[in-house]
Image (spheres, grey):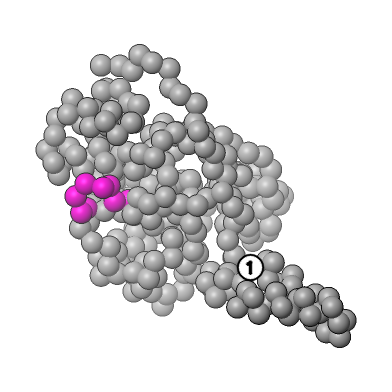
Amino acid sequence: MARTSIRERPDREEVLWPVQTACPACGHLMRLRYDNCRTLVTLSGLVRLRLKIRRCEAADCSQRRRPYRPEAEGAIALPEHEFGLDVIALVGTLRHREHRSVPEIHQTMGERGVAIAERSVTNLVDRYDELLATSLSDSARLRRRLAAQGRVILALDGLQPDVGHEVLWVIRDCISGEVLLARSLLSGTARDLAPLLREVASAVGVPVAGVVSDGQTSIRRAVKQALPGGSAPTLPVPLPARGGAAGLRSRPPCQDGVEETCARRAPDRAVGRRDERSPGRGGAGLLCRRAQRHHR
């Protein structure tokens, strides 16, 4: 059964910014060059993503003029897909965990307000099975592509539907956008996630330059356990962890990955600089000190 009605216009727009500013290949600054837009169907409704694309312009760089997309995009949807990852995770859970048929899943999605055709439900079930069967060792093309770029920046995303307790964990490469591994686990502890990262790190054949996640403590511990000496930095990004909504309409977070530094916002730094420049200016300095005390 195909969808016969025209899809509604999205009622909200999210702007995604790349966290990585230095080129992974040569280290030069990647500047913002253009925007890409895509409309997705998620469990929370239609959303229009505005993606800020960076590119390296260094003449001797192997990644010259290749687009670097926002890291958070892959946590919301797979490349060239109309439905979000949360919809795929819910369809797969209803199919394999609840043992529901395709018409029953289609009816459930309609009750949740998700505009989807019945044949699209079948496609999403197949896509969910493909995700769980993803194996890096079986794809020679993917290994050649990763070897050409020289390194990978891993992203670890967890999506949990509101039915059942399984979490769909997806590990992908932010440079190429390829999904490297996907597993459905009942928990997301460091003991469960470390083997996944260890399996990917040993199979890619190239160094792991960093790990992008939403900054959960279990993920940080898993990175330290799985990667050699915990050398790869963990960059906290506002990703939709475990299927929750993420506030993505913002500028990119701090680059150093330290929450204590990021907690000090730009207005506070501006106030501090004004207070240091004019410590004895009477009213102006007093207003700054009062604002600092009020903030604390």
From this view, report whether residue 127 is shown above or below residue 231. above
Report the quarter where the C terminus lies.
bottom right
Q: Residue furthest left?
A: 99
Residue 227, visible in the rendered structure: no
**Magenta-highlighted residues:** 159-166
Between 5 and 154, the one lying in front of the other is 5
From this view, report whether residue 201 is shown above or below residue 91. below
Crowd class of label 1 (few under 14; some 14 to 19; many from 20; radius 10 Å): few
From this view, report whether residue 245 is shown above or below residue 194. above
From this view, report whether residue 211 is shown above or below residue 36. below
Q: Residue at x 34, y 31 (%)?
A: 114
Q: Residue furthest top?
A: 4
Between 202 and 284, the one lying in front of the other is 284
| Image x and y of residue 134, in percent | 29, 46
The secondary element bearing badge 1 is classed as loop
Inspect the image, locate mark 1, and give the three-letter code of the amino acid beneath it. Answer: Arg
Inspect the magenta stretch and tell me whether residue 5 lies in it. no
Q: Residue furthest bottom?
A: 280
Instruction: Kindly identify which residue carries mark 1.
Output: 265
Between 262 and 257, the one lying in front of the other is 262
Magenta span main SS:
loop
Could you tell me how many numbered marks the image carries? 1
Q: Residue at x 86, y 85 (%)?
A: 280
| Image x and y of residue 192, in percent | 25, 65
Report the quarter where the N terminus lies.
top left
